Image (cartoon, grey):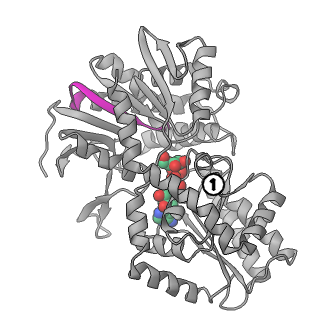
Amino acid sequence: MATTTEPDRKFVIVANRLPVRWVDDDRNGDSGHWETSPGGLVSAVRPSVADYGQAGWIGWTGSDVDEEPFVDDGLLLHPVSMTVDEKELFYDGMSNGTLWPLYHDKAVPAEFHRHWWDGYRRINRRYADAAAKVAAEGATVWVHDYQLQLVPGMLRELRPDLRIGFFLHIPFPPPELFVGLPWRDEIALGMLGSDLIGFQTPDAADNFHRLVVRRGLADDSGPGVLAHAGRRVRTRAYPIGIDVARYDQAARTDKVSDHARDLRARLGAPHTVMLGVDRLDYTKGIDVRLRALKELLDDGDINPRQVTMVQVAQPSRDDVEAYITLREEVDRMVGEINGDHGRVGFPVVHYIHQNVDFPELLAMYRAADIMLVTPFRDGMNLVAKEYVAARYDLTGCLVLSEFAGAATELSDALLVNPYDIDGLKAAIARAVAMEPTEARARLEPMRAAVLANDAVDWARGFLADLADR
Ligand code: ADQ
């Protein structure tokens, strides 16, 4: 690994996190190694770097230790550091206490605090300064997500020569909701610093378009085109995809099949295995699916000796109050279901509050007859697509919230409104009873949709439009 600070990068990604993270090998932190960061953003965006030669990535390492820029496999990694206090204001506060709930329909109330906003601006400035430092003359810069919405505007002021794209991974709320935000115009103007703004769905793109026109921040120049500050800013939906081949190929291996078989045996060989895989986040509707399961069991509509559920919840944002409360609620509900309906050695819900590695995740997708994806609101939801990619034999049933971005492409799933518990119960009961021919007929078009738009297609599609003037 070599270091460099030359402004020589033709393509620069700016995202909250770097694509690698430091993992301590011992408790003293004396030795450790870099490994690929988990999550959909990295796996979708990382391959696009290969098309550009000299590329750079600006992001946070996740620690408060200052790190020097370094080159890994030709990619310049430029760490942005923040103190513990700054992280509290920028990340826990403004990003995850204000914007995250506001953009997800206020699943919990969004809080507005001026000191959070000040921290958000300060850290956005730090990312913009770093991008201005490493981007070569005329370079393309691709900024990601709700933590960094001010970066395009700040960067345009510093470097008008750059081509700037922005992609929002989460929903963009209707203007009626967004206008309650005290810093609505600053945020919208930050995004308008881009040449191209990508969203997960046409609804999100439309919400942004209507907002900026209504607020007088830009003029409508036709579908998906805005006029702002003498420039053309385009907006469009680019639904994100997954690395389909990776899931499909791994799913077909004997190793994963054996693992899945073993998993089912360890679950007590139930007739039906249901699965949930989510970050432990209140937008994901983990509580609502547990409630539906509990009522179905209480009412005797499903038999606890025949149906087992595995819920994997990846630890997430555990410094934020609402996440601590959710964790307690899920713990309690799992305990209640197992207390009422489990037997010694045979709990009904197997709850894992941990990361699982790729082979384990794949084996779970293969072992699951029913996949429950029930967010109240979700930009896309990659888990739904991963499950479909792993079901190469066209068996299995996806129950999917109509409020996940993925519902647009996966409209052959059993679509549910997660606020409607009776509807969700009916969908689960229907999935348990579904005939293989119907499951097959539903999975076939969904697999075609997932295969037709993988992560590389998604990134290339966005970047081709960004390059096109
Ligand atoms: P997330 O809210 O994180 O992403 P999602 O799209 O489902 O949601 O991606 C989660 C990823 O983490 C998936 O790849 C999944 O396999 C993995 N994962 C979940 N639980 C895990 C566990 N316990 N162990 C290991 N891996 C686990 C945000 C937006 C989404 C949008 C993505 C990408 O909220 O709407 O789809 O960005 O744009």
Q: Quadrant of residue 229?
A: top left
Q: What residue is pinned by disc 1? A: 284
**In front here: 443 or 153?**
443
**In front here: 177 or 87?**
177
Seen as rendered, the residue at the extreme top is 230
Locate residue 68 relative to residue 364 in the image: left or right: left
Q: Residue at x 24, y 42 (%)?
A: 51
**In front here: 328 or 168?**
168
The location of residue 176, given as percent across then percent down, is 70, 26
Overall secondary structure of the magenta section: strand
Residue 358 shows in the view: yes
Q: Residue at x 79, y 64 (%)?
A: 425
Locate residue 392 relative to residue 412 in the image: left or right: left
Q: Amino acid at mark 1?
A: Lys
Locate residue 409 relative to residue 417 in the image: left or right: left
Looking at the image, is 16 positioned above or below residue 347?
above
Residue range (magenta): 133-146
Residue 317 shows in the view: no
The location of residue 440, given as percent across then percent down, is 61, 68
The location of residue 155, given as percent across then percent down, is 34, 23
Q: Residue at x 69, y 30 (%)?
A: 177
Q: Is residue 135 magenta?
A: yes
Q: For the residue with label 1, is its CB less than 8 Å from the closest atom of ligand 1?
A: yes
